[in-house]
Amino acid sequence: MLNNIKSDRTVWIIVLLICIFSLLVVYSSSNVLAHKFRHGDTASFLFKQFLVIAVGFGLMIGMHFINYKYYSRLSQLAYLCILPLLVLTLVMGKSENGAERWLDVFGFSVQTSEIAKLVLIIYVARVLTVKQEQLKNFGVILLHLILPISLVCVLILPANFSTAAMLFVICFVMMFLGQVPLKFMAILTGGGLVLLFLFGFWVWKSPEDFKRGETWKARIAHFFHIDTGNNITHDLTKNSEENFQADMAKMAIANGKIFGVGPGNSIQKGVLPQASSDFIFAVFVEEYGLIFGVGLIFLYMTLFFRGIAILKKTDKVFGGLMVVGLSFAIIFQAFINMAVAIGLFPVTGQPLPMFSSGGTSILFTLAAIGIILSVSRRSAMEKEGKGGELEAA
């Protein structure tokens, strides 16, 4: 069977391994949610995770068979569709943990920012390809890149600041790799940093102006051990569930040591409300040890470098930019999640790709990998075709 796979086999193996460990750890870490919502039935969470992964794998397989060039045209229509979805999420989104990030569609909760992330990366890759000869015109960059990127990020920001910031950085990296002139990149970098500073200052001084302003301020204050003198923020900083989780996650990692306490034997999973999602890496290290924790990091790193290898094998600009954008998005999100778990980054709410429990995140991450494999498959087929022509000649 492996001989019939024309796309990168290493990527298939890595994704399969990550998903297998996901099933094991989600089953182990979902006991808190199971007792809270399902009368202790952890099997239902295992079944749900298995079902989502199975559907995601089907999506990945299907998308890897499609010629990736079609995604270029589809991204234009998808971009126009995602904007009203993001607006609807802000207006009538489903609230969870204080953030309106989910939209109910036919009875299913959909995290629209995950869809927007995939769509925007493909859209930016298309624009950088189609407008390649016009990138020396700053007006073209503002109209066709900065405006569409900023519009999506601004619509995501109120409910999910970390995703908006991460997506902007990913698109910025793609612009750099897409040969946007360095002088324009310098201007955009300077302008972006100024706007970020002004926005941060505004949130810090008047958090009540934003729906999640107090939460953002409390996370930063807790991370840097700042006493703001504000009773509301002080209470959030000291006693919030998020900060409690951050402290418990560090204890779980410390408890795991080198070899872990064994599968299913995590102690902290019983006190971590988000043990199966945002802080699943901490439970994984506690149960399987630092060795497996480093192994998981190695899998994500290898996935990224396989993306770079696919990039080098394709001579098409659109395919290459799409692969590097999607690969970078996956590893960037993975590292942010793990950095939060070990206390190197403030709490963000970013799931561990293909590992944390959930629906939309897993489905669209596997869809992204399907697109990456589509580029790999097409490149291999073109190489075989050229080889056949040479042999016939």
Image (tube, rainbow, N blue to C red):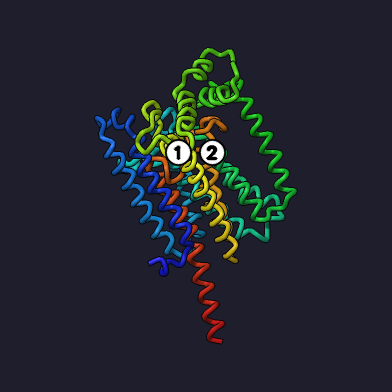
The CA span between labels 1 and 2 is: 24 Å
Of callouts 1 and 2, the N-terminal one: 1
Kindly indicate whether the residue at mark 2 contacts the one at mark 1 (C-beta within 8 angstroms).
no
Residue 91 visible to an observer of this rendering: yes
Q: Amino acid at mark 2?
A: Ile
Residue 21 location, quadrant: top left
Number of marks: 2
**Image mark for residue 259:** 1
Measured from the top left, where is residue 214 in percent x and y? 52, 22
- Residue 235 vs residue 85, the one in the foreground: 235
Quarter holding the N terminus is bottom left
Examine the rendered structure and indicate whether residue 169 appears above or below residue 90. Answer: below
Q: Amino acid at mark 1?
A: Phe
Measured from the top left, where is residue 258 in percent x and y? 48, 37
Measured from the top left, where is residue 58 in percent x and y? 36, 56
At x 45%, y 49%, the residue is 365
Examine the rendered structure and indicate whether residue 72 appears above or below residue 228. Answer: below
At x 56%, y 54%, the residue is 305
Name the residue that disc number 2 marks: 336
Extreme residue toward the front, this view: 259
